[in-house]
Each structure stands twice: as C-alpha cells, then as structure tokens.
Amino acid sequence: MRNYKVVMAIFLLLQIGGLSFGQKKSRAKKAPVLNDRKYWLGEMDKMVRPVLKNLAADSLRITMPKVTSIHVDNKAHRIEVQYLEILGRVLSGIAPWLQLEDGNQEEMAMRKQYRKWVLSGLTNALDSNAKDFMRFDIGGQQLVDASFLAVAVVRAPWIYEHLPKREQARLVGAIKTTRKFKPAFSNWLLFSAMNEAFLAKIGSEWDPMRVDYALQQMEQWYVGDGMYMDGESFAYDYYNSFVIHPYLASIAEIIGKKTNVYQLMFDKVRNRNERYAVIQERLINTDGTYPATGRSIIYRGAAFHHLADMAWRKALPKQLSASQVRCALTAVLRKTLESPTTYQDGWLTLGLYGLQPNLGDFYNNQGSPYLATSIFLPLGLSEKDPFWADADQKWTAQKIWTGENFPNDHSERLK
C-alpha cells in the first residue's frame, strides 16, 4: 500500500511538471506572435493615449511634462506652444485611422473611445474658458502647428463634421488667425498653403495667393531626382518627408479639385512623389535603422512620413509592393521605439533611440517628437487591404544584403 502511494505521488508530480510515462518533456509554449496591424495599434495607443485622454479631461497642461531641448532658444515660449504642437502632430498622424469604419470589435471599440476624446479635446483646446485652451496667435510656431491640425482635419473629415457648429467656427477662426505670421522662406510656405487648402476644402473663404506662392516657389526649389531644397540651399535631412512631399500631395489633391490651372505641375508632383518613395524605402536598413542625418532627427519614424503617406493613399510606385513597405516600416517602428528610455512616465523623450538630449534642436519641446505618429498613417487602410493582408515580404535592403540578384537603382530625370 505504501509503495502504491509513493508511485501515485511520483505520477502526479510528473503530470504537474508536464511529463507522463513514456513521453518526453513537452516544449514550453511560445507567446503568440502579434500580427503587424495589432502591433502598430498597440504602439499608436501607447504613444497617443496620454495626450488625448488628458486633453479630453482638460488636464493636458497639468500632466504634460514641461520639457525643452538643452539647446533651447526661448524656454518659456517653447513650453507655451508645446500644447498646440502636440495636438496637431498627434491628430495628423492618427487621422486616417479615426476616419476608418473598419476593424475587429476590439479595434472598433478603441476607435470609438478615441473619437470621443478627440471631440472633447478639441472643444477644450478651442474654449478660452478651459484650462487647456490653446492660443494660435502667440508666435510663428503656431502657424506650423495650426497646419498640422489642418492636415488632420483634411485627412479625417469626420472630425470637422462631428464638431458642434460653435467649435467648427472657432477652429476656422483659429486657423485664420495664423495669417498674421509671415512664414520663413522655406518649407514654412507650405504651412500657410496647407491652412488655406483646409479652408478651401470645407468651403470657407480661402486665399489662393498664399497657395500659389508656395506652389510656385517649391517649383523653383526642385533640384531633381524627386527632391526639393528647403529654402535657398539644399540640406541632406528628412524635410522632404517630414513636410514637403506629404503637404504637396494634400494640397494638390484639394486644389486640383478647385482649379485645373496647376494640372501640369501636379502631374510633376505625383511623379516626384513616386521617385522619392523609392528612395525612402531604400534608406531603411535590414534591421530598421536608417541614416541619422540632418536636423529634427528626434521625430523618429516621421522620417518616413512620405512613404507612409504614399502607402495610405495607395499611390506607391510599381517597384514597391504594399507588403514590403509594411515590413520595412514595421522594422523602423520596432527599432525607434525599442529603447527602454524611449518613454519617461509615459511620454516620448527627445532622441532617436531613446533619450538623447544632444540630438534635440533649439526649437524642440515635449510636443515635438510626436510627429512620429505620422508613420501610423497606413492604419487608415482596412485590415483587408493588401498592405495588411498580404504575406510578409523582404524590402530592398534585405533582398540586396542577402545576396539576391536585384535590379539596380538610378536617378530619374524628373522635371
């Protein structure tokens, strides 16, 4: 009897430990692999939730850290403008996803919550009696950030359509307020043009001259092979992606429906957009890294704002499949967000790979790195779209650096 009890005890211990007589030890179960869309949604939520949840509760100014670059020029002013800066950048990146009517039950529920936060948050931002009221008239930086807010509403008409009439009028008035600022002779011309394009889209009074000036000047600054100068000299940075190409694409889409005067110019813009998308995809290394050149590098994944925008617009050139772009951008997301110091207390830090204070520019504040949300633009595509549904595919760097016989690249003589 004693031997029987001993044998049964051993049997039970082996069963608990995952063994049985005559069987080998079973392998530990692997954690389920997240598909790309679920991973993107999780990272978007992590990045954006503290911003919009607090703004909806009228507590953004209370909770948002008052951080500036160590190279800051005017600390008090940079902190004062960081609230509109973070709002415009966050909304411009997640707008296509807010506009989408698609997804599983979990995603639909998350979008419903975010839509509520956005409407409440904008109401607070536009209400002079709210703690989180945001002024649009305290400096030239407001012209920049108003334009990102304009881009957001252009990308997600749902936002404007569901704002109460009073908030619609306040938003239009706030955007028009920025006309008082003279844009710098650089990509800033596109900020003025984008604000006017937004007004044109919603049927409000708009200034064609501000749009024309920006478009004509950008033509003068085109240097070839899909790239523009940012002002009177060329800089090897990411401003062709941060601003120039995505803004030109949005302006062309809106103004092209208002007049055919720019038809030939917009054809050129589309061709250049395609070429620069090819260049952007080739900049992404096998591990998701990319050349850390130029100013504003702390915008992280926004270095590929243009590539993400082209994917969302379903305007990728024939050389690039949607799935290879998805895989390349996923690699960028993982690399730029994997550092344990990417966030502090839930807020993005100033840096490219975690907290790197010396990488900040004089104009950077806590709101600046949130342009990184622009990499999330393809979340505005249905989960059934080839971008998400097609099987994984190597991107150019992976194909070349694993020895595949791959077509060469050469510049295009685009006018």
Image (spheres, rainbow, N blue to C red):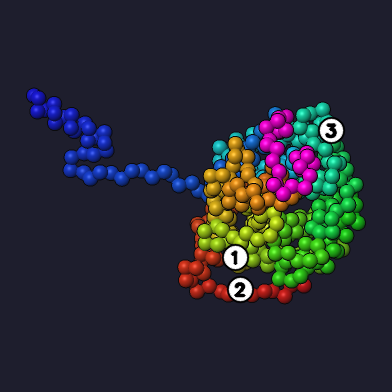
Residue in view at x 63 percent, y 44 percent: 349
Vertical placement of residue 195 versus 135, above or below: below
Which amino acid, by three-letter code, is at mark 2? Asp
Q: Please tell me which of labels 2 and 1 falls first in the chain.
A: 1
Residue 165 appears in the rendering: no
> x, y percentage for residue 158?
73, 41
Does the magenta portion include 199?
no
Alpha carbon separation for disc pair 2 and 1: 9 Å
- Label 2 Cα crowd, 10 Å radius (few <14 / some 14-19 / many 20+): few
- Label 1 Cα crowd, 10 Å radius (few <14 / some 14-19 / many 20+): some
Residue range highlighted in magenta: 58-80
Vertical placement of residue 297 versus 234, above or below: above
Vertical placement of residue 12 versus 409, above or below: above
Left or right, 67 with reference to 198: left
Kindly identify which residue carries mark 1.
282
Any mark on residue 166, and which? Answer: 3
Q: Secondary structure at mark 1?
A: helix
Mark 2–mark 1 CB contact (< 8 Å): yes
Left or right, 316 with reference to 6: right
Q: Secondary structure at mark 3?
A: helix
Does the magenta portion include 73?
yes
Any mark on residue 1, and which? Answer: none
Q: Nearer the viewer, residue 222 or 311?
A: 222
Q: Considering the image in quadrants, where does the N terminus appear?
A: top left
Which amino acid, by three-letter code, is at mark 3? Arg
